[in-house]
Image (tube, rainbow, N blue to C red):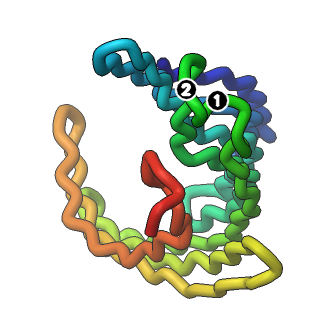
């Protein structure tokens, strides 16, 4: 099963700034079971994230933010209570930390047309290694009272390497 919990804190300073902070945790579990003749196997895996996000808007032109998350991945572990496989070594969990900081700038081109450009810097640390990336984004926004149309481009790097059900490969 999947579970998620979050606490949000919103803060606003007049019309010049607002901030949203979120503390969250998510867990994705797989508890597959399989039987073959007299044998019964359980195949369990889990991914757990605990993170903090903070986003600040300064007026209508600037947005700044920072995110941090700790990932714990436990690959699938096959367990049998009725065979030589029971009591063996359990799967080993891996831990990693992912963080990012970002800034976005918005320009009003016309009363109903705006242009956004942004840059996000990411760091991913696992097993004593660090991976860094820069992720640009851009969008054009057309807004009317009852409609909003956005054309966007964003480059995002995915550094979470081991998310499969097993620890093979």
Residue at image position (79%, 34%) is 11
Mark in the foreground, 1 or 2:
2
Say whether residue 117 is visible.
yes
Element marked by disc 1: loop
Q: Horizontal and vertical percent for residue 5? A: 66, 21
Q: Is residue 56 left or right of residue 37?
A: right
- Label 1 environment density (alpha carbons within 10 Å; few <14, some 14–19, many ≥20): few
Indicate whether 109 appears above or below 28.
below
Q: Is residue 101 left or right of residue 38?
A: right
Q: Residue at x 71, y 57 (%)?
A: 94
For label 1, the residue is 86
Residue under numbered circle 2: 83
Where, quadrant-wise, is the C terminus in this rendering? bottom left
Instruction: Residue 72: give x, y in percent of width and height.
Output: 70, 48
For the point 75% across and 84% down, the residue is 129
Q: Position of residue 107 (x, y in %)?
A: 43, 74
Displayed quadrant of residue 23: top right
Residue 48: give x, y in percent of width and height: 66, 38
Frontmost residue, 127 versus 151 = 127
Residues at marks 1 and 2, CA–CA distance in whole angstroms: 6 Å
Which corner quadrant of the image does residue 100 belong to?
bottom right
Q: Is residue 20 visible?
A: no
Badge 1 vs badge 2, beta-carbon distance below 8 Å: yes
Question: What is the secondary structure assignment of the residue under circle 2?
Answer: loop
Res 119 label: none
Q: Is residue 105 above or below residue 150?
A: below
Task: Answer few, some or many: residues within 10 Å of disc 2's Cα (few below 14, many 20 plus, some between 14 and 19).
Answer: few
* Above or below: residue 88 compared with residue 119: above
């Amino acid at each position: 099963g999947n579970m998620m919990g979050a606490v949000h804190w919103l803060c606003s300073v007049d019309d010049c700034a607002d901030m949203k902070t979120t503390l969250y945790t998510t867990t994705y579990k797989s508890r597959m079971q399989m039987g073959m003749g007299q044998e019964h196997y359980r195949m369990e895996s889990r991914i757990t994230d605990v993170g903090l996000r903070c986003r600040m808007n300064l007026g209508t032109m600037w947005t700044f933010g920072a995110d941090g998350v700790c990932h714990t991945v436990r690959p699938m572990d096959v367990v049998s209570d009725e065979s030589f496989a029971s009591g063996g070594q359990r799967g080993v969990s891996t831990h990693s930390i992912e963080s990012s900081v970002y800034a976005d700038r918005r320009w009003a081109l016309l009363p109903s047309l705006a242009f956004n450009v942004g840059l996000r810097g990411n760091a991913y640390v696992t097993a004593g290694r660090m991976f860094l990336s820069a992720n640009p984004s851009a969008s054009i926004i057309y807004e009317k009272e009852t409609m909003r149309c956005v054309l966007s481009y964003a480059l995002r790097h995915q550094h979470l390497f081991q998310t499969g059900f097993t620890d093979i490969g």
